[in-house]
Amino acid sequence: MSGDRAFVEAAERELLPLVQRLHRRIRDAVVKAFRERTSDELAGVAGDDGGDTIYGIDRVSEEVLLEELGAHAAALGGLVLVAEGLPGGRVVLPRGRDAASARYVVIVDPIDGTRGLMYQKRSAWVLTGIAPNGPAPKLSDIVLAVQTEIPTVKQYLADELWAARGRGFSATRVDVLRGTSAPITLGPSRADGIAHGFAMLSRFFPGARDAIAALDEEIVRAVLGPPPAGRALCFEDQYLSSGGQLYELMAGHDRFTADLRPLFDRLLAERGEPKALSCHPYDVCTLIIAEEAGVIVTAPDGGALDAPLDVDTPVAWVGYANEKIRAAVEPALRAALERRGLK
């Protein structure tokens, strides 16, 4: 059903305005909370209900999420809401409805990039993907996605992006102080390679950072050769937000990004350490916006990226700004993974 044009159009018509309103409410509530409360207060650990650690600021967004979607769920034919912080990672709305009878699956990350935002270092994002309900919905079933920037308190501009599968994408820049907005043009880099651009592997947290850094170095040297004395051939930006990383590719800021953390779980086990915190499906639920914008996103083996719509499955992904960059980087990436036995 995800490829059904009529369903895509219905989802866009029925849910796009609702989700955009929801995102704006979350954005405004979170920014207001930071204006009125301290970062230490909002950065306190509030729970661990599934998927990731829940911080105080996450609770602010969850309240808005349940209130807004709950008020409209019946009229929409029922929603299966998937999000971190919910008991078991999912809830059926309206409450008490049978999950099988719901029309839509709505997967949400109310704040993607919590850690950077709660210390007011960098913007976070509200992410939502919508798919037809079914026995085993996946990322590839998502037909509509919305991504909304939550700015830091000192920032007055914030972007809103959305896309329906096969219908292109749109982007708007909002002045959050004045409440005005205007369309903007975004597009991935047209560069032929990664030289003198941002290109990186994600290594946000302790665990396998040493091994990921070694892999990163091997890939870059294979593509660009050894760096000349006193020169930098490419750069990295460890943006601690999967939605933010996809945005940077869409905006032409980054040329290559790969989050391969799940591939290093075996190494961690050999070291006697637990699995690392990884990207989850809700972190990349707005994937179709990047794809509609022209970004190429794949699994580490070069195949299509897919995963069930839940809060637990680890996701490894690779993003290229264009086909020339993919052709330059992917062979080195796959060869380096093969040498290490990483799949």
Image (cartoon, helix red, strand yellow):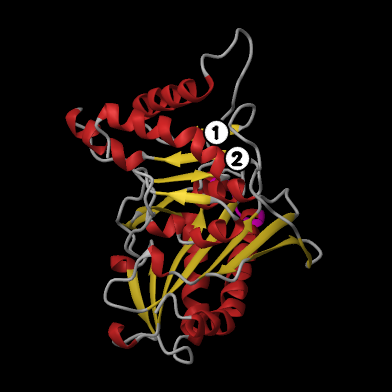
Residue drawn 49% across and 45% down?
319
**Snapshot quadrant of residue 30:** bottom right
What quarter of the picture does the N terminus occupy?
Answer: bottom left
Residue 234 percent coordinates (x, y): 59, 26
Residue drawn 74% across and 60% down?
173
Q: Identify which amino acid the numbered label 2 is placed on.
A: Asp
From which residue to which does the magenta span run?
35-39
Q: Is residue 307 magenta?
A: no
Q: Label 2, on which residue?
A: 254
Residue drawn 54% across and 46% down?
245
Q: Is mark 2 on a helix, strand or loop?
A: strand
Can you tell which mark lies on residue 199? 1
Q: Residues within 10 Å of mark 2 (few under 14, many from 20)?
A: many
> Marks 2 and 1: CB-CB under 8 Å?
yes
Q: In this view, does 155 lie to the left or right of 162?
A: right
Between residues 284 and 68, which one lies in front from this camera angle?
A: 284
**Snapshot quadrant of residue 105:** bottom left
What quarter of the picture does the C terminus occupy?
Answer: top left
Let me know if residue 102 appears in the view: yes
User: From this viewpoint, which residue is outermost toward the top?
Assistant: 229
Q: Does the magenta stretch include residue 37?
A: yes
Does residue 56 lie above or below 209 as drawn?
A: below
Residue 134 percent coordinates (x, y): 31, 78
Q: What element carries label 1?
A: strand
